[in-house]
Image (cartoon, grey):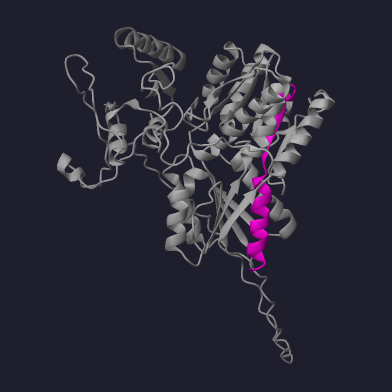
Amino acid sequence: MKFKKLAWLLFAVMLLASMVLTACQPKAEQAAPAEEAAPAEEAAPAEEAAPAEEAAPKFKVCQVTDVGGIDDKSFNATAWKGVQDAIDKLGVEGKYLESQQQTDYEVNINAFVEEGCDLIISVGFLLADATAAAAENNPDQNFAIVDVNWLDYPNLYGSGFAIDQATFLAGYLAAGMTQTGTVATYGGIQIPPVEAFMDGFVLGVQEYNKVHGTDVQVLGWDPQARTGLFVGNFESTDDGRTMGESLMDEGADIIMPVAGPVGAGTLAVMEERGSGMLIGVDTDWSLQFEAQKDYILASALKNMDLYVYQTIEKAMNGQFEGGNYLGTLENGGVGLGYGSAWADKIPDDLKAEIEDIKAKIIAGEIATLPEMPAEGAAPAGEGAALGTEENPIIWGVVPSGETERVVSGFEEVAKLIYDQTGLVIQPFVATEYAGVIEAVCSDPPQAHMTSLATFAYILAADKGCVEAALVAVRFGSPKYNGQIYVRADSGIETLEDLKGKTFCRPDP
Protein backbone atom coordinates (compact mmCIF):
# COMPACT_ATOMS: atom_id res chain seq x y z
CA MET A 1 0.00 0.00 0.00
CA LYS A 2 1.42 3.35 -0.91
CA PHE A 3 0.95 6.33 1.37
CA LYS A 4 1.64 9.87 0.37
CA LYS A 5 2.33 12.98 2.38
CA LEU A 6 0.40 16.07 3.37
CA ALA A 7 1.71 19.63 3.10
CA TRP A 8 1.25 23.19 4.55
CA LEU A 9 3.28 26.40 3.95
CA LEU A 10 4.86 28.58 6.59
CA PHE A 11 8.18 30.33 6.31
CA ALA A 12 9.71 33.66 7.18
CA VAL A 13 13.11 35.23 7.18
CA MET A 14 14.00 37.55 10.02
CA LEU A 15 16.39 40.40 9.32
CA LEU A 16 18.48 41.74 12.11
CA ALA A 17 20.64 44.77 11.54
CA SER A 18 23.37 45.50 13.99
CA MET A 19 25.40 48.60 14.63
CA VAL A 20 28.82 48.75 16.13
CA LEU A 21 29.65 51.87 18.11
CA THR A 22 33.19 52.86 18.91
CA ALA A 23 34.37 55.49 21.34
CA CYS A 24 37.48 57.59 21.00
CA GLN A 25 39.88 58.19 23.84
CA PRO A 26 40.05 61.87 24.90
CA LYS A 27 43.24 63.54 23.80
CA ALA A 28 45.81 63.54 26.57
CA GLU A 29 46.89 66.90 27.94
CA GLN A 30 50.20 68.03 26.51
CA ALA A 31 52.93 68.26 29.15
CA ALA A 32 54.86 71.50 29.64
CA PRO A 33 58.29 71.43 28.00
CA ALA A 34 61.08 70.53 30.39
CA GLU A 35 64.07 72.86 30.79
CA GLU A 36 66.84 72.02 28.38
CA ALA A 37 69.50 70.04 30.19
CA ALA A 38 73.22 70.24 29.51
CA PRO A 39 74.34 67.54 27.13
CA ALA A 40 75.63 64.47 28.92
CA GLU A 41 78.92 62.88 27.99
CA GLU A 42 78.38 60.37 25.27
CA ALA A 43 78.62 56.86 26.64
CA ALA A 44 80.10 53.96 24.72
CA PRO A 45 77.35 52.08 22.91
CA ALA A 46 76.20 49.01 24.79
CA GLU A 47 76.30 45.71 23.03
CA GLU A 48 72.96 45.03 21.37
CA ALA A 49 71.06 42.40 23.34
CA ALA A 50 69.88 39.35 21.46
CA PRO A 51 66.09 39.46 20.92
CA ALA A 52 64.17 37.24 23.32
CA GLU A 53 62.90 34.08 21.73
CA GLU A 54 59.14 34.15 21.12
CA ALA A 55 57.20 31.51 23.02
CA ALA A 56 55.92 28.77 20.76
CA PRO A 57 52.18 29.14 20.14
CA LYS A 58 50.00 26.72 22.05
CA PHE A 59 48.41 23.77 20.27
CA LYS A 60 44.89 25.02 19.51
CA VAL A 61 41.93 22.64 19.87
CA CYS A 62 38.54 23.85 18.63
CA GLN A 63 35.21 22.13 19.34
CA VAL A 64 31.97 22.63 17.39
CA THR A 65 28.95 21.56 19.44
CA ASP A 66 25.66 20.12 18.34
CA VAL A 67 22.53 21.99 19.43
CA GLY A 68 21.93 21.97 23.16
CA GLY A 69 24.92 24.09 24.14
CA ILE A 70 28.33 23.38 25.65
CA ASP A 71 26.75 22.81 29.08
CA ASP A 72 24.05 20.39 27.95
CA LYS A 73 24.98 17.92 30.73
CA SER A 74 25.27 15.37 27.94
CA PHE A 75 27.45 14.70 24.88
CA ASN A 76 28.56 18.31 24.21
CA ALA A 77 29.63 18.75 27.82
CA THR A 78 31.33 15.35 27.97
CA ALA A 79 33.35 16.03 24.82
CA TRP A 80 34.30 19.47 26.16
CA LYS A 81 35.54 17.83 29.37
CA GLY A 82 38.09 15.99 27.22
CA VAL A 83 39.30 19.34 25.87
CA GLN A 84 39.42 20.79 29.39
CA ASP A 85 41.48 17.82 30.58
CA ALA A 86 43.90 18.48 27.70
CA ILE A 87 44.09 22.16 28.70
CA ASP A 88 44.98 21.18 32.28
CA LYS A 89 47.34 18.28 31.56
CA LEU A 90 48.80 19.04 28.12
CA GLY A 91 48.75 22.83 28.12
CA VAL A 92 46.70 23.21 24.94
CA GLU A 93 44.49 26.16 24.09
CA GLY A 94 40.80 25.23 23.88
CA LYS A 95 37.93 27.02 22.17
CA TYR A 96 34.37 26.16 21.20
CA LEU A 97 31.51 27.42 19.05
CA GLU A 98 27.93 26.51 19.94
CA SER A 99 25.56 25.47 17.17
CA GLN A 100 22.07 26.84 17.71
CA GLN A 101 20.62 25.08 14.66
CA GLN A 102 21.75 22.62 12.01
CA THR A 103 22.67 25.38 9.55
CA ASP A 104 25.37 26.47 12.01
CA TYR A 105 27.40 23.27 11.64
CA GLU A 106 29.13 24.16 8.39
CA VAL A 107 29.52 27.83 9.35
CA ASN A 108 31.17 27.03 12.69
CA ILE A 109 33.50 24.37 11.29
CA ASN A 110 34.66 26.66 8.48
CA ALA A 111 35.19 29.50 10.95
CA PHE A 112 37.64 27.32 12.86
CA VAL A 113 39.34 26.29 9.61
CA GLU A 114 39.90 29.98 8.84
CA GLU A 115 41.19 30.56 12.36
CA GLY A 116 43.91 27.97 11.89
CA CYS A 117 43.00 25.53 14.65
CA ASP A 118 45.39 22.60 14.96
CA LEU A 119 42.55 20.15 15.60
CA ILE A 120 38.82 20.67 15.02
CA ILE A 121 36.45 18.37 16.92
CA SER A 122 32.79 18.21 15.92
CA VAL A 123 30.32 16.60 18.29
CA GLY A 124 27.56 14.35 17.08
CA PHE A 125 26.03 12.30 14.31
CA LEU A 126 24.24 15.29 12.80
CA LEU A 127 27.55 17.05 12.05
CA ALA A 128 28.78 14.22 9.82
CA ASP A 129 28.05 15.83 6.44
CA ALA A 130 29.52 19.21 7.36
CA THR A 131 32.62 17.59 8.85
CA ALA A 132 33.13 15.32 5.83
CA ALA A 133 32.88 18.28 3.45
CA ALA A 134 35.38 20.28 5.50
CA ALA A 135 37.82 17.35 5.68
CA GLU A 136 37.65 16.87 1.92
CA ASN A 137 38.09 20.56 1.14
CA ASN A 138 40.91 21.09 3.67
CA PRO A 139 43.26 18.09 3.43
CA ASP A 140 45.93 19.79 5.57
CA GLN A 141 43.53 20.36 8.48
CA ASN A 142 43.04 17.63 11.10
CA PHE A 143 39.51 16.78 12.22
CA ALA A 144 37.91 14.48 14.78
CA ILE A 145 34.22 13.72 15.24
CA VAL A 146 32.21 12.14 18.04
CA ASP A 147 29.66 9.40 17.26
CA VAL A 148 30.57 9.07 13.57
CA ASN A 149 32.70 6.12 12.47
CA TRP A 150 32.05 5.61 8.75
CA LEU A 151 33.86 8.56 7.14
CA ASP A 152 37.10 7.70 5.36
CA TYR A 153 39.56 10.60 5.13
CA PRO A 154 43.25 10.56 6.06
CA ASN A 155 42.80 13.79 8.05
CA LEU A 156 39.72 12.66 10.00
CA TYR A 157 39.66 10.45 13.12
CA GLY A 158 36.13 9.24 13.84
CA SER A 159 34.64 7.49 16.82
CA GLY A 160 31.96 5.01 17.70
CA PHE A 161 30.77 3.75 21.06
CA ALA A 162 29.26 0.37 21.83
CA ILE A 163 26.81 2.14 24.12
CA ASP A 164 24.39 -0.75 23.69
CA GLN A 165 26.75 -2.72 25.95
CA ALA A 166 26.31 -0.16 28.75
CA THR A 167 22.55 0.24 28.29
CA PHE A 168 22.13 -3.55 28.26
CA LEU A 169 23.42 -3.44 31.84
CA ALA A 170 21.12 -0.47 32.54
CA GLY A 171 18.12 -2.39 31.23
CA TYR A 172 19.00 -5.41 33.37
CA LEU A 173 19.29 -3.11 36.39
CA ALA A 174 15.97 -1.41 35.63
CA ALA A 175 14.18 -4.74 35.33
CA GLY A 176 15.62 -5.79 38.68
CA MET A 177 14.61 -2.55 40.42
CA THR A 178 11.16 -1.75 39.01
CA GLN A 179 8.25 -1.88 41.43
CA THR A 180 5.51 -1.60 38.80
CA GLY A 181 6.82 -4.13 36.28
CA THR A 182 6.99 -1.44 33.59
CA VAL A 183 10.01 0.60 32.50
CA ALA A 184 10.46 2.96 29.56
CA THR A 185 12.81 4.77 27.23
CA TYR A 186 12.45 7.51 24.64
CA GLY A 187 14.76 9.35 22.27
CA GLY A 188 15.48 12.81 20.93
CA ILE A 189 15.80 12.36 17.17
CA GLN A 190 15.65 8.89 15.64
CA ILE A 191 19.23 8.41 14.50
CA PRO A 192 21.44 5.31 14.86
CA PRO A 193 23.42 6.46 17.94
CA VAL A 194 20.16 7.10 19.81
CA GLU A 195 18.66 3.80 18.67
CA ALA A 196 21.74 1.96 19.98
CA PHE A 197 21.03 3.21 23.52
CA MET A 198 17.45 2.00 23.27
CA ASP A 199 18.35 -1.35 21.68
CA GLY A 200 20.65 -2.30 24.53
CA PHE A 201 18.17 -1.17 27.17
CA VAL A 202 15.33 -3.31 25.81
CA LEU A 203 17.57 -6.36 25.35
CA GLY A 204 18.86 -5.97 28.91
CA VAL A 205 15.30 -6.07 30.24
CA GLN A 206 14.61 -9.13 28.11
CA GLU A 207 17.72 -10.84 29.50
CA TYR A 208 16.53 -10.22 33.06
CA ASN A 209 13.12 -11.66 32.19
CA LYS A 210 14.78 -14.76 30.73
CA VAL A 211 17.01 -15.28 33.78
CA HIS A 212 14.33 -14.64 36.41
CA GLY A 213 11.16 -15.76 34.63
CA THR A 214 9.62 -12.30 34.99
CA ASP A 215 7.61 -10.25 32.51
CA VAL A 216 8.87 -6.68 32.87
CA GLN A 217 7.45 -4.55 30.05
CA VAL A 218 9.33 -1.82 28.14
CA LEU A 219 7.53 1.20 26.73
CA GLY A 220 8.98 3.48 24.07
CA TRP A 221 10.98 1.26 21.72
CA ASP A 222 10.53 -1.87 19.60
CA PRO A 223 14.00 -3.01 18.46
CA GLN A 224 12.60 -5.28 15.74
CA ALA A 225 10.05 -2.92 14.18
CA ARG A 226 12.46 0.03 14.77
CA THR A 227 9.61 2.20 16.02
CA GLY A 228 9.27 4.08 19.27
CA LEU A 229 8.90 7.39 21.07
CA PHE A 230 10.95 10.41 19.96
CA VAL A 231 10.46 14.07 20.83
CA GLY A 232 12.22 15.29 17.67
CA ASN A 233 14.90 17.42 19.35
CA PHE A 234 17.70 17.53 21.91
CA GLU A 235 16.77 20.78 23.65
CA SER A 236 13.20 21.07 24.94
CA THR A 237 12.81 20.20 28.63
CA ASP A 238 9.08 20.86 28.17
CA ASP A 239 8.96 17.90 25.80
CA GLY A 240 10.78 15.87 28.44
CA ARG A 241 8.12 16.81 30.98
CA THR A 242 5.31 15.82 28.63
CA MET A 243 6.93 12.50 27.75
CA GLY A 244 7.75 11.75 31.38
CA GLU A 245 4.20 12.46 32.53
CA SER A 246 2.76 10.26 29.79
CA LEU A 247 5.07 7.31 30.48
CA MET A 248 4.63 7.51 34.25
CA ASP A 249 0.85 7.68 33.79
CA GLU A 250 1.16 4.43 31.81
CA GLY A 251 2.87 2.78 34.76
CA ALA A 252 6.58 3.22 34.05
CA ASP A 253 8.54 3.88 37.24
CA ILE A 254 12.03 3.81 35.65
CA ILE A 255 12.71 5.85 32.49
CA MET A 256 15.85 6.22 30.37
CA PRO A 257 15.61 9.38 28.19
CA VAL A 258 18.12 9.45 25.31
CA ALA A 259 17.69 13.09 24.41
CA GLY A 260 20.34 15.18 26.15
CA PRO A 261 18.90 18.06 28.22
CA VAL A 262 15.34 16.98 27.31
CA GLY A 263 15.63 14.32 30.01
CA ALA A 264 15.89 17.02 32.68
CA GLY A 265 12.18 17.67 32.12
CA THR A 266 11.39 14.05 32.94
CA LEU A 267 13.58 14.27 36.04
CA ALA A 268 11.67 17.38 37.17
CA VAL A 269 8.36 15.49 36.90
CA MET A 270 9.73 12.68 39.10
CA GLU A 271 10.88 15.18 41.72
CA GLU A 272 7.48 16.91 41.72
CA ARG A 273 5.60 13.63 42.05
CA GLY A 274 8.03 12.25 44.60
CA SER A 275 8.32 8.96 42.72
CA GLY A 276 10.09 7.31 39.82
CA MET A 277 13.73 6.73 38.92
CA LEU A 278 15.70 7.96 35.94
CA ILE A 279 18.65 6.40 34.13
CA GLY A 280 20.86 9.12 32.71
CA VAL A 281 22.96 8.87 29.57
CA ASP A 282 26.41 10.00 28.44
CA THR A 283 27.52 11.39 31.82
CA ASP A 284 26.88 10.67 35.51
CA TRP A 285 23.58 12.44 35.99
CA SER A 286 23.73 12.09 39.78
CA LEU A 287 26.69 14.48 39.68
CA GLN A 288 25.25 16.75 36.99
CA PHE A 289 21.88 17.01 38.79
CA GLU A 290 23.00 16.62 42.39
CA ALA A 291 19.87 18.27 43.80
CA GLN A 292 17.76 15.51 42.20
CA LYS A 293 20.17 12.64 42.88
CA ASP A 294 17.53 10.72 44.86
CA TYR A 295 15.69 10.11 41.58
CA ILE A 296 18.71 9.02 39.52
CA LEU A 297 19.20 5.26 39.69
CA ALA A 298 22.20 5.04 37.36
CA SER A 299 23.75 6.41 34.17
CA ALA A 300 24.86 4.72 30.96
CA LEU A 301 28.24 6.34 30.43
CA LYS A 302 29.63 7.19 27.02
CA ASN A 303 33.14 8.31 27.93
CA MET A 304 33.66 10.63 24.98
CA ASP A 305 36.06 12.72 27.05
CA LEU A 306 38.53 9.82 26.99
CA TYR A 307 38.40 9.64 23.17
CA VAL A 308 38.75 13.43 22.84
CA TYR A 309 41.72 13.60 25.22
CA GLN A 310 43.56 10.70 23.59
CA THR A 311 42.97 12.19 20.13
CA ILE A 312 44.37 15.56 21.20
CA GLU A 313 47.41 13.88 22.74
CA LYS A 314 48.10 11.94 19.52
CA ALA A 315 47.75 15.07 17.40
CA MET A 316 50.13 17.02 19.66
CA ASN A 317 52.72 14.26 19.40
CA GLY A 318 52.53 14.09 15.62
CA GLN A 319 50.80 10.70 15.72
CA PHE A 320 47.45 11.80 14.28
CA GLU A 321 46.08 9.66 11.47
CA GLY A 322 42.73 8.81 9.96
CA GLY A 323 40.68 5.91 11.20
CA ASN A 324 38.15 5.24 13.93
CA TYR A 325 38.04 4.67 17.68
CA LEU A 326 35.57 2.22 19.25
CA GLY A 327 34.69 2.64 22.92
CA THR A 328 33.62 -0.59 24.66
CA LEU A 329 33.11 -2.01 28.13
CA GLU A 330 36.49 -3.68 27.78
CA ASN A 331 38.51 -0.50 27.10
CA GLY A 332 36.46 1.77 29.36
CA GLY A 333 34.92 3.73 26.51
CA VAL A 334 31.43 2.93 27.86
CA GLY A 335 30.15 1.80 31.23
CA LEU A 336 27.37 1.78 33.81
CA GLY A 337 27.62 4.06 36.84
CA TYR A 338 25.27 3.73 39.79
CA GLY A 339 23.69 6.94 41.06
CA SER A 340 25.39 8.42 44.12
CA ALA A 341 22.22 8.10 46.21
CA TRP A 342 21.46 4.56 45.02
CA ALA A 343 24.84 2.83 44.94
CA ASP A 344 24.37 1.42 48.47
CA LYS A 345 20.65 0.66 48.02
CA ILE A 346 20.90 -1.63 45.01
CA PRO A 347 20.91 -5.25 46.26
CA ASP A 348 24.35 -6.86 46.25
CA ASP A 349 23.08 -9.95 44.45
CA LEU A 350 21.74 -7.77 41.60
CA LYS A 351 25.09 -5.97 41.39
CA ALA A 352 26.84 -9.34 41.23
CA GLU A 353 24.56 -10.46 38.39
CA ILE A 354 25.35 -7.25 36.49
CA GLU A 355 29.09 -7.83 36.90
CA ASP A 356 28.64 -11.36 35.58
CA ILE A 357 26.63 -10.06 32.61
CA LYS A 358 29.36 -7.47 31.94
CA ALA A 359 32.03 -10.19 31.84
CA LYS A 360 29.94 -12.24 29.41
CA ILE A 361 29.42 -9.23 27.14
CA ILE A 362 33.16 -8.58 27.04
CA ALA A 363 33.76 -12.26 26.30
CA GLY A 364 31.28 -12.11 23.42
CA GLU A 365 28.88 -14.56 25.04
CA ILE A 366 25.93 -12.14 25.13
CA ALA A 367 24.74 -10.03 22.18
CA THR A 368 23.64 -6.51 23.07
CA LEU A 369 22.11 -5.59 19.71
CA PRO A 370 19.00 -7.21 18.20
CA GLU A 371 19.29 -9.77 15.45
CA MET A 372 18.17 -8.09 12.25
CA PRO A 373 16.49 -9.98 9.39
CA ALA A 374 18.82 -11.54 6.85
CA GLU A 375 19.31 -9.60 3.64
CA GLY A 376 16.26 -10.03 1.46
CA ALA A 377 14.05 -11.13 4.35
CA ALA A 378 11.08 -9.03 5.40
CA PRO A 379 11.70 -6.98 8.56
CA ALA A 380 9.70 -7.86 11.65
CA GLY A 381 6.08 -6.80 11.30
CA GLU A 382 6.20 -6.58 7.51
CA GLY A 383 4.82 -10.07 7.12
CA ALA A 384 1.53 -8.62 8.31
CA ALA A 385 -0.43 -6.22 6.15
CA LEU A 386 0.30 -2.55 6.69
CA GLY A 387 -2.34 -0.98 8.90
CA THR A 388 -2.75 -3.95 11.25
CA GLU A 389 -1.96 -4.23 14.96
CA GLU A 390 1.24 -6.12 14.04
CA ASN A 391 2.30 -3.56 11.43
CA PRO A 392 0.54 -0.23 12.10
CA ILE A 393 0.74 2.83 9.87
CA ILE A 394 3.09 5.36 11.49
CA TRP A 395 1.87 8.94 11.01
CA GLY A 396 4.40 11.67 11.79
CA VAL A 397 2.95 14.84 13.30
CA VAL A 398 4.31 18.14 14.63
CA PRO A 399 1.97 19.72 17.21
CA SER A 400 0.96 23.25 16.20
CA GLY A 401 -0.33 24.02 19.67
CA GLU A 402 -0.27 22.49 23.14
CA THR A 403 1.29 19.05 22.65
CA GLU A 404 -1.01 17.10 24.96
CA ARG A 405 -4.15 18.60 23.40
CA VAL A 406 -2.95 18.02 19.84
CA VAL A 407 -1.90 14.43 20.53
CA SER A 408 -5.25 13.76 22.19
CA GLY A 409 -6.98 15.12 19.09
CA PHE A 410 -4.81 12.95 16.87
CA GLU A 411 -5.88 9.87 18.81
CA GLU A 412 -9.50 10.75 18.04
CA VAL A 413 -8.63 11.03 14.33
CA ALA A 414 -6.86 7.66 14.45
CA LYS A 415 -9.92 6.10 16.11
CA LEU A 416 -12.20 7.57 13.44
CA ILE A 417 -9.98 6.18 10.66
CA TYR A 418 -10.00 2.77 12.33
CA ASP A 419 -13.79 2.82 12.68
CA GLN A 420 -14.22 3.72 9.00
CA THR A 421 -11.44 1.64 7.42
CA GLY A 422 -10.13 -0.85 9.97
CA LEU A 423 -6.61 0.62 9.56
CA VAL A 424 -4.48 0.92 12.70
CA ILE A 425 -2.66 4.26 12.99
CA GLN A 426 0.12 5.09 15.45
CA PRO A 427 1.47 8.63 15.93
CA PHE A 428 5.11 9.62 15.66
CA VAL A 429 5.20 12.93 17.55
CA ALA A 430 8.05 15.38 16.95
CA THR A 431 8.49 18.99 18.01
CA GLU A 432 9.98 20.13 14.72
CA TYR A 433 9.53 19.28 11.05
CA ALA A 434 13.15 18.12 10.81
CA GLY A 435 12.20 15.17 13.02
CA VAL A 436 9.36 13.94 10.84
CA ILE A 437 11.34 14.56 7.64
CA GLU A 438 14.11 12.34 9.00
CA ALA A 439 11.51 9.72 9.94
CA VAL A 440 9.86 9.49 6.52
CA CYS A 441 13.13 9.77 4.60
CA SER A 442 15.10 7.21 6.63
CA ASP A 443 15.87 3.79 5.17
CA PRO A 444 13.85 1.85 6.15
CA PRO A 445 11.28 4.60 6.81
CA GLN A 446 10.32 5.19 10.43
CA ALA A 447 7.05 6.86 9.42
CA HIS A 448 4.79 5.95 6.52
CA MET A 449 2.98 9.26 6.23
CA THR A 450 3.17 12.72 7.73
CA SER A 451 1.52 16.11 7.88
CA LEU A 452 3.88 18.85 6.72
CA ALA A 453 3.74 22.58 6.21
CA THR A 454 4.47 23.49 2.61
CA PHE A 455 8.03 24.66 3.16
CA ALA A 456 8.80 21.48 5.11
CA TYR A 457 7.23 19.51 2.26
CA ILE A 458 9.57 21.23 -0.21
CA LEU A 459 12.57 20.18 1.92
CA ALA A 460 11.34 16.58 2.11
CA ALA A 461 10.42 16.44 -1.59
CA ASP A 462 13.90 17.71 -2.43
CA LYS A 463 15.21 14.56 -0.75
CA GLY A 464 13.00 12.55 -3.12
CA CYS A 465 11.15 10.68 -0.39
CA VAL A 466 7.67 12.24 -0.20
CA GLU A 467 4.79 13.03 -2.51
CA ALA A 468 1.69 15.09 -1.63
CA ALA A 469 -1.47 12.99 -1.41
CA LEU A 470 -3.94 15.32 0.31
CA VAL A 471 -4.13 19.09 0.73
CA ALA A 472 -6.11 20.73 3.51
CA VAL A 473 -8.78 23.23 2.51
CA ARG A 474 -9.32 26.03 5.01
CA PHE A 475 -11.92 28.77 4.60
CA GLY A 476 -12.64 27.47 1.12
CA SER A 477 -9.04 27.66 -0.08
CA PRO A 478 -6.22 25.07 -0.32
CA LYS A 479 -3.65 27.80 0.43
CA TYR A 480 -3.07 30.81 2.61
CA ASN A 481 -1.01 33.93 2.22
CA GLY A 482 2.48 34.29 3.62
CA GLN A 483 5.13 36.96 3.68
CA ILE A 484 8.70 36.76 2.46
CA TYR A 485 11.23 39.12 4.01
CA VAL A 486 14.43 40.05 2.19
CA ARG A 487 17.28 42.41 2.92
CA ALA A 488 16.63 45.97 1.80
CA ASP A 489 19.83 45.92 -0.24
CA SER A 490 19.26 42.46 -1.77
CA GLY A 491 17.91 43.73 -5.10
CA ILE A 492 15.05 41.22 -4.85
CA GLU A 493 11.82 42.86 -5.98
CA THR A 494 9.76 40.09 -7.60
CA LEU A 495 9.07 36.39 -7.08
CA GLU A 496 11.20 35.70 -10.16
CA ASP A 497 14.16 37.31 -8.38
CA LEU A 498 13.94 34.61 -5.70
CA LYS A 499 15.06 31.90 -8.09
CA GLY A 500 18.26 30.27 -6.87
CA LYS A 501 18.19 32.07 -3.51
CA THR A 502 18.57 30.39 -0.12
CA PHE A 503 15.56 30.49 2.22
CA CYS A 504 15.60 30.38 6.02
CA ARG A 505 12.66 29.58 8.25
CA PRO A 506 11.92 28.79 11.91
CA ASP A 507 11.08 25.17 12.75
CA PRO A 508 8.24 24.60 13.30
Which quadrant would residue 136 be assigned to in this image?
bottom left
User: Is 125 contained in the magenta span?
Assistant: no
Of 286 and 33, nearer the camera is: 286
Res 480 visible: yes
Residue 5 lies left or right of residue 139; in this view the side is left
Quarter of the image containing the C terminus?
Answer: top left
Which quadrant would residue 498 be assigned to in this image?
top left
Residue 322 percent coordinates (x, y): 55, 62
User: Is 316 contained in the magenta span?
Assistant: yes
Residue 16 percent coordinates (x, y): 37, 39
Q: Residue at x 53, y 55 (%)?
A: 25
Residue 471 percent coordinates (x, y): 22, 22
Region in magenta: 292-318
Relative to 124, say whether 221 is above or below: above
Total number of numbered discs in the rendering: 0
Q: Residue at x 60, y 14 (%)?
A: 248
Res 285 visible: no
Of 458 and 385, nearer the camera is: 385
Quarter of the image containing the N terminus?
Answer: top left
Q: Residue at x 31, y 41 (%)?
A: 463
Q: Residue at x 40, y 20 (%)?
A: 392
Residue 351 lies left or right of residue 300; in this view the side is right
Q: Which secondary structure class fits the magenta region best?
A: helix
Residue 478 percent coordinates (x, y): 19, 21
Relative to 129, say whether 322 is above or below: below
